[in-house]
């Protein structure tokens, strides 16, 4: 009888600890979701503003009078990807790394930064895949997108994120690291939005316009 009572008591304590642990995660996860989704959406908005003179796609319906260059559907795709992909990935990775390599010593920070560098291709590939599929394209399109654009995006990130990671791991509490990273990511998300939404059609149009310009220049000469 005492053994059964003890087992039930231990199980109840385990359940309470689990519930308490989940409750502790809810608030920082919500903050991370809001911060990352806002950062990605703002980055996409700025990216579209910078690209407004280079948009070749013809809208199926008349553009709105307010900010006619802003593709709201594209921003919705980027925001959805942030909520469903980027936030769970970044939140899980940051907490897993902290559990494996706790502390703010230089050696521990170096290990955390190394892990971030090693897993970055996975995160980038997930984002590209999500954006491609949400735009109605196929898994084959997503695979090609990852193959063509992930390596150079990874190299670009390797020049930017190590510094951000060092500051984040060294000075920022665990619960607020995704939030701070999202602030630093506002600039990065401009680039990510550009690459994630780049299509082969736009590249072909750009090459064609460049070729035409060179042709007319040579003809004039």
Image: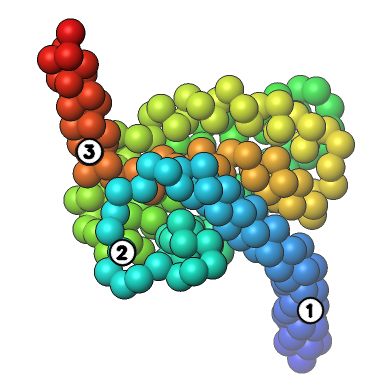
- Mark identifier at residue 205: 3
Q: Is residue 122 left or right of residue 165?
A: left
Residue sticking out furthest to the front: 220
* Quarter occupied by the N terminus: bottom right
Task: Decide which of 29, 8 is in the foreground and name it.
Answer: 29
How far apart marks 2 and 3 lie (CA) works out to 17 Å
Query: Going 83% across and 33% down the picture, which residue do you hit?
Result: 170
| Separation (CA) of disc 3 from disc 1 | 60 Å
In percent of the image, x 76 and y 22: which residue is there? 107
What residue is pinned by disc 1?
Answer: 16
Q: Residue at x 13, y 15 (%)?
A: 219
> Are the two marked residues, 2 and 3, in contact with CB atoms closer than 8 angstroms?
no
* Residue neighbourhood size for the residue with mark 3, other residues' Cα within 10 Å, grouped as few (<14), some (14–19), many (≥20): few
Location of residue 161 (image quadrant): top right
Name the residue carrying label 2: 59
Sequence-wise, which precedes: disc 2 or disc 3? 2
Q: How far across and how far down the image is residue 209, in percent?
A: 23, 32
Which residue is nearer to you in this view: 159 or 216?
A: 216
> Residue 217 location, x and y as percent?
21, 16
Against 200, is 160 above or below? above
- Going from N to C along the chain, the mark reached first, 2 or 1, is 1
* Helix, strand or loop for disc 2: loop
x, y percent for residue 73:
42, 66
Question: In this orientation, does residue 80 appear?
Answer: no
Mark 1 closeness class: few <14, some 14–19, many ≥20 residues within 10 Å? few
- Say which of 99 and 200 sits in front: 200
Distance between the Cα atoms at labels 2 and 1?
Answer: 54 Å
SS at badge 3: helix
Locate residue 103, reporting x and y percent. Answer: 83, 36
Horizontal side, residue 53 vs residue 23: left or right: left
Instruction: Name the element at disc 1.
Output: helix
Q: Is residue 7 above or below residue 135?
A: below
């Amino acid at each position: 009888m005492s053994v059964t009572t003890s087992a039930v008591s231990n199980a109840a304590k385990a359940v309470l600890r689990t519930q308490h642990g989940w409750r502790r995660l809810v608030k920082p996860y919500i903050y991370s979701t809001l911060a990352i989704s806002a950062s990605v959406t703002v980055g996409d908005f700025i990216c579209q503003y910078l690209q407004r003179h280079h948009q070749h796609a013809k809208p199926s319906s008349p553009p709105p009078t307010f900010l006619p260059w802003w593709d709201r559907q594209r921003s919705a795709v980027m925001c959805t990807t942030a909520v469903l992909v980027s936030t769970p990935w970044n939140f899980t990775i940051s907490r897993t790394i902290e559990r494996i390599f706790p502390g703010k010593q230089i050696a521990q920070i170096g290990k955390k930064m190394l892990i971030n560098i090693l897993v970055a291709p996975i995160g980038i590939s997930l984002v590209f895949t999500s954006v491609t599929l949400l735009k109605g394209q196929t898994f084959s399109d997503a695979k090609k997108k990852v193959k063509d654009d992930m390596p150079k995006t990874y190299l670009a990130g390797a020049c930017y994120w190590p510094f951000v990671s060092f500051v984040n791991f060294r000075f920022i509490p665990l619960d607020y690291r995704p939030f701070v990273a999202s602030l630093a990511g506002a600039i990065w998300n401009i680039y990510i939005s550009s690459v994630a939404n780049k299509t082969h059609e736009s590249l072909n149009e750009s090459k064609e316009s460049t070729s035409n310009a060179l042709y007319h220049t040579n003809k004039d000469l």
